Amino acid sequence: MSKATVVVRHLNAPHQTESLTKFQPLNDALKAEIQTAVGELFDRFGGAALLKESKEVFVKPNGIDGQPYCYTRPEVVEAVIRYWYAHGAKKVYLFENSTQSNATRLVYAVVGYDAICKRTGAVPVYLDEDKTVEFTFEGKPSEKDDPLGYQNNPLTLLQILYLDHGGKGGWTMVMGEGHDTKEINAITGKVLIVGDCAINEVGDRLISRLGKKNVYLSHKCNSLADSAAAMFHLMHVNPMEFAPINPIKATTCLLLSKRHGSSALVPSVFSNIIKTV
């Protein structure tokens, strides 16, 4: 395998001193530095000579989520797109498939990528709305590859909802397997069971004793959409808080994504009101 070259550029203009949980637009000095740095980067590797016969350019940002600093800065994305159009590209495509519990079209609207595409003429590509092709990985995955995968996402989401969105407690979450029978029998109130291992082990018992209305099920090993739907309802957090744009625009994005065949698993916008899992 050939060695990759990684280029790191330090920007000198000052930026925010506040917590990075609060997104701040870049000042003009930083924008100018980014424009220069992007140009120097691509020039270093050949600039226009890198274009293929089609003159098409595919830009893959990190657009997994719309939360602050979970995505490539829009100023950088726009600088890259403008560079390639200025250097002979006929078409620039901006493509991404956002993480679980997100619709890529909605993330683009939240972070400003859709507006960039309109300004520059770039073509937005939402991979969750595209056709999928099966791919078989060589080798066999095991628990060693992700020993805490079923825990990390639910616990991270729990922390975000509680600390950043004022989520409420007063309920129990069960994960994994090999649970003490006495502890399970002592559970009262509402309970979220995460993962099929835990559901298969204690689900029927808890539903029989507590009632289906008090038991929430998040299937598979790591269904973030199901876990989010349950926590939105249990913690009384409006899922639309995660899309800090006009509610009508956010709803329109979700409807359009479904209309265009999105395979994204997204909690209902009414998850905080209606129990859906």
Image (cartoon, rainbow, N blue to C red):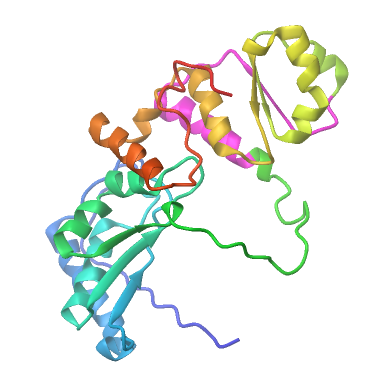
Examine the structure image and report whether residue 178 is included in the region drawn in magenta.
yes
**Is residue 79 shown above or below 45?**
above
Q: Is residue 20 visible?
A: no
Q: Is residue 11 above or below residue 72?
A: below
Q: Is residue 106 above or below residue 272?
A: below
Residue 178 is situated, as x and y percent measured from the top left of the image, at 85, 31
For residue 165, say whether it is visible. yes
x then y, percent, for residue 237: 43, 22
> Which quarter of the rendered picture does the N terminus lie within?
bottom right
Residue bounds of the magenta highlight: 152-179
Image position, residue 175 (x, y; %): 72, 31
Q: What residue is at 44 percent from the left and 15 percent from the top?
A: 273
Name the quadrant containing residue 41.
bottom left
Please say if 197 is above or below 106: above
* Residue 74 inside the magenta-drawn segment: no
- Write the residue at 31% across / 33% down: 251
The location of residue 34, given as percent across then percent down, is 23, 68
Q: Is residue 170 left or right of residue 145?
A: left
Q: Is residue 221 left or right of residue 48?
A: right
The residue under the point 52% across, 34% down is 157
Left or right placement of residue 185 versus residue 60 in this view = right
